[in-house]
Amino acid sequence: MTDKLEKLAPWLFVVALFAIWEAACRIFSVPNIILPAPSAVWAAMVRFWWPLLTNSFVTLWTTTAGFLMAVGFGLLLGLVVGWSRTIYRGLYPVMIGFNSIPKVAVVPILVMWFGIGEIPAILTAFLISFFPIVVNVATGLATIEPELEDVLRALGASKLDVMRKVGIPRAMPYFFGSLKVAITLAFVGAVVSETIAANRGLGHLMTQAGSNFQMPLVFAGLIVLAIEGIAMYAVTAWLEQRMTGWAFRSQGSAGG
Amino acid sequence: MIDIENVSLAYAGRGGPVLAVEGLNLAVAKGEFAAVVGPSGCGKSTLMKLVTGLVRPTTGAVRVNGAAVSGPVKIAGMAFQNANMLPWRTVADNLLLPLEIVEPYRSQFRSRKAEYKARVEDLLATVGLGGFGHRFPWELSGGMQQRASLCRALIHEPSLLMLDEPFAALDAFTREELWCVLRDIWERLRFTVVLVTHDLREAAFLADRVHVMSARPGRIIETRDVSFPRPRDLDVCYDKAFTDIVRDLRDKIAEVRKA
Ligand SMILES: Nc1ncnc2c1ncn2[C@@H]1O[C@H](COP(=O)(O)OP(=O)(O)O)[C@@H](O)[C@H]1O
Ligand SMILES: [Mg+2]
């Protein structure tokens, strides 16, 4: 009974939220231009389903492309950074500095270089999301138990052996864990860039709708964004579970 | 087998160099079971690293098998207080790890894998872990993990076994069980052992010679021969001669701790 309730709880909250939203809009007769009621948003979704769908595919594609670039580059850089303490110490401050630049500020530069369109969105998604991957992979490598490394080195293992046999498998849970964060960030990056400078994508659609005072459509876009974001998060979370189940199972059961 | 001659080693500490060992002299013969005891932080783990070539001495010379140690020795099996099993590998695959690294096993690993697997099962059986090869390390108790760790240190039949407080984290009963496991394997294979321990009874029960180290900077200040006949039974621990040795060792350590 309580189990069932727990499973249902998130859905109940969502339904309740929409119900309160709808009720509030009606009771206080909030104008559509300020806050459209869910019914109006739904109507907009039904009416504009085709532009919503096509533009969400554009956003999906820019996010995914940026994310995949971040995965490749982040994995590579993470391995390099985690490889040696010296590189770790040298590169880390540089990366922190780079990461503290708000990436929104880079979008105009990307637009200057590549023009308005999908490339700035992809690159923003990439720039904003590779950092957590690098940090996680490097951390996984850098935190190999020193005694385990001693065991292997006393057997004559090279640095490459240690990385292949221990470092990389050990960094995998960190890597897959970082994907959840990275995909969320990539999504933010892509949408922000589309909002500023694009001619397609959900961000662009919402900006357009906003400047035409079509608030229900703006909110419809928002909801599609939420659904898309949740779906991408779920895929990476599932991937994490699938690929590194041992890390979850071994937690808490490691006797001394 | 091991010859440490007037060795000192300084680590680069935060506030200048830390002299971990100084004037260290130690000789261990081939096939000998040596134990090293001493107060915490006196440089016992450092001694292990010096012998296995994981650190180079600042001054002095370390020789293993007659050759000066200039890098990792490649013949040593090691085990520590923490079993350090790889959680993504089964127990059997953990034991195969040294064979994936050490020559000549390494280059024959693919073609002779079945044979190696059988060897792993045999070794597991001798420490009472028969049939546990397909389990994951985290499914095993602490004592069982430590048995597996011991097997991993021995699977490539090293001529030198280095044990750094391997039983320190275990309860008293499990610890004594593992003493006997180690004793039996050593009786059979007679490799050279250096065992670092806090437990004086452990040292006296297992070793041929017990070396006592001073407080940091560590050096050997006393060496006791333990000449009870082998194979030893746990009952030997209650002999007057045995408890006398343990008391002497304890007094010695109390002395160096005060100094
Ligand atoms: N990597 C290191 N850097 C600096 N100091 C170290 C390092 N490793 C050990 N030491 C110091 O050297 C001394 C001996 O350490 P260790 O050999 O681990 O002692 P033991 O194993 O006997 O407890 C300790 O005082 C310790 O603080
Ligand atoms: Mg130690």
Image (cartoon, coloured by chain):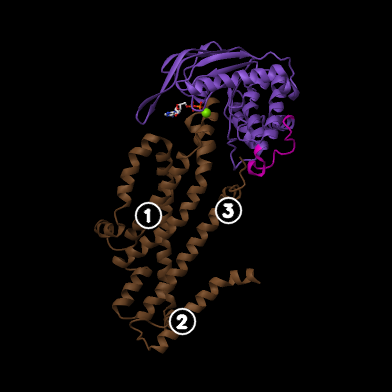
Chain colours: A brown, B purple
Please name the residue shown 71% across and 15% down the image: B228
- Residue A159 or residue A67, whichever sits in front: A159
The answer to whether residue B52 shows anywhere in this view is no
Local crowd size for mark 2, using a 10 Å CA cut-off: few (<14), some (14–19), many (≥20): few
Amino acid under label 1? Phe
The C terminus of chain A sits in image quarter:
top right
How many marks overall? 3
What is the C-alpha distance between the residues marked 2 and 1?
38 Å
* SS for dot 1: helix
| Mark 2 residue's CB less than 8 Å from ligand 1 | no
- State which tag comes first along the sequence, 3 or 2: 2
Specify the quadrant that holds the N terminus of chain A.
bottom right
In the picture, the disc for residue A242 is 3
Circle nearer the viewer, 1 or 3: 3
Question: Considering the numbered disc 3 on the image, is that residue within a helix, a strand or a loop?
Answer: helix
**Pointer 3 and pointer 2 on the same chain:** yes
Subunit under mark 3: A
Q: Which residue is tagged 1?
A: A126
Which of the numbered marks, if any, corresponds to residue A239?
A: none
| Residue B145, quarter of picture | top right
**Left or right of residue B90: residue A235:** left
Residue B136 in the magenta stretch? The answer is yes
| Residue A48 point in image, percent of width and height | 41, 79
**Residue tagged 2:** A20
| Residue segment shown in magenta | B126-142
* Label 1 to label 3: alpha-carbon separation: 24 Å
Is residue B145 on the magenta stretch?
no
